[in-house]
Amino acid sequence: MSTPPGHVEREVEKILAQAAEYDEVQLLSGLAVLMADAKEYFDLHTVEGADVETFRSVYGDTMMTSGFWTDWEERKLWEMDVWDEVNDVTGLEPGELTERAAEGNPDVTPLGNPEIEHEWFMGPGEEFLNRFGKKFRETICGPGGPYEQFEDGLIGQEQLPQVIVTTLLASGFSGGAVWIPMAAYVGLLLVKAGLKTYCENPESDLEELV
């Protein structure tokens, strides 16, 4: 799933531009769709690696603790409902967004449709953001990370999302284009939540900030 660095940078810019005007509700709903999409893609394809295991771990924890489901059957029904709704609204098939990204052409314009805004997307999206954010807090907030660069005046507010995304890709997700949409949504939501609050209040839950 490796991709030439120059191509990754261009695709990161493209995805951030596509999603820049989405509000928090649209981004959280879209993040839930992206995580369900990635889960479907990795179930259908033989893909291994630490980054895939990290994703499966965060996804599994989200599914187990979000409070939306009482058992495995309900979680499976949620995944099926996601795709019934997304397919009806956008025409996307399960795993299609991740497959496009894996092929080097990520695209989140279908997730700009306001009809995907649902509480049953937002809740899992919030939980996923919270768990993902906690897992990578040191990467984003620690020495040399995006927050320190911002506080030191090395980068401006407009550059923050891209720096966060490229940092995530370099540190935990192998730099592959397959992760660009998810990393871009996390980066945009962290900036909207307030990076200072996120970094200086490590016990805060991100779903309370967005």
Image: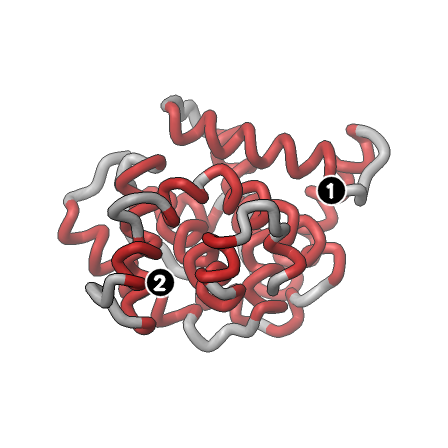
For the C terminus, give its image quadrant. Answer: bottom right
- Residue 174 image position (x, y, % from top left): 28, 35
Q: How is the image coloured?
A: secondary structure
Q: Nearer the viewer, residue 85 or 38?
A: 38
Give me the C-alpha separation between circle 2 and circle 1. Answer: 26 Å
Q: The disc labelled 2 sits on which kind of residue?
A: Pro
- Residue at x-position 72% and y-position 63%: 118
Q: Residues within 10 Å of mark 2 (few under 14, many from 20)?
A: many
Q: Is residue 42 above or below residue 77?
A: above
* Horizontal and vertical percent position of residue 24: 58, 68
Residue type, label 1: Ser
Give the number of callouts.
Answer: 2
**Which residue lies under the disc numbered 1?**
66
Horizontal side of 65 relative to 6 (left or right) equals right
Q: Is residue 125 visible?
A: no
Residue extending furthest bottom? 21
From what the image shows, is residue 43 above or below residue 31? above
Relative to 108, residue 199 above or below = above
Q: Residues within 10 Å of mark 1 (few under 14, many from 20)?
A: some
Is residue 5 among what the camera can see? yes
Where is residue 84? Give x, y as percent. 70, 52
**Circles 2 and 1: CB atoms closer than 8 Å:** no
Residue at figure coordinates x 33%, y 64% from the top left: 160
Residue behind mark 2: 161
Give me the disc on residue 11.
none
75 or 153, nearer to the observer? 153
Label 1: state its secondary structure. loop
Left or right of residue 176, residue 203 in this image: right
